Image (cartoon, rainbow, N blue to C red):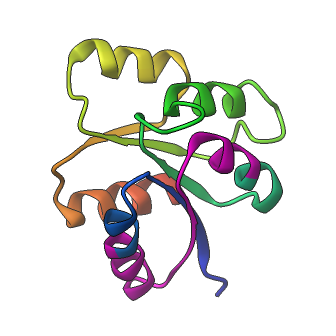
Amino acid sequence: MDKKRILLVDDEKDLVETLTFRLKANNYEVIPAYDGQDAFDKAKKEKPDIIILDLMLPKMDGYKVCGLLKADARYRSIPIVLFTARAQDSDRKMGEEVGADAYVTKPFEPQVLLAKIKELLEK
């Protein structure tokens, strides 16, 4: 079975490294990105199976990245999990408006994130 590919986007390098370790241990391939523009470019080039996307990013925020990808028929079907410390209802609503498939707040339980990834990949 091919490994599912996850585009993991966060400007906190330590978090990306920690999550990459956890995801690889669960048999996922991880493509890291550290800013919104890099995330957008890698999503188009790599066509990952799922995207874990922080909101507060340099160059382009997560809402914009999500909205641009969901507006393009070629990338619309890639599930996107917004992964952020922003937990207000207005943030969640904005996430829904740009087409995010799920919303996970930091600090987070790794098992919750892994369960959400598995659920979205099985749709």
* Magenta region, residue range: 18-41
Instruction: Reply above or below: 102 against 87.
Output: below
Residue 36's x, y, as percent? 59, 41
- The residue lying at 44 percent from left, 83 percent from top is 24
In the rendered view of the protein, which quadrant contains the N terminus?
Answer: bottom right
Q: Is residue 103 left or right of residue 37?
A: left
Residue in the foreground of this view, choosing between 2 and 122 = 2
Residue in the foreground of this view, choosing between 73 and 36 = 36
Is residue 35 rendered magenta in the image?
Answer: yes
Snapshot quadrant of residue 117: bottom left
- The residue lying at 15 percent from left, 50 percent from top is 107
Residue 54's x, y, as percent? 42, 43
Q: Is residue 18 left or right of residue 73?
A: left
Q: Is residue 6 left or right of residue 109?
A: right
Snapshot quadrant of residue 95: top left
Residue 71's x, y, as percent? 74, 24
Instruction: Reply above or below: 28 against 87.
Output: below
Q: Is residue 76 left or right of residue 61?
A: right
Instruction: Reply above or below: 113 against 74.
Output: below
Count the marks: how many? 0
- Residue at the limit of the structure toward the front, as seen here: 58
Is residue 2 rendered magenta in the image?
Answer: no
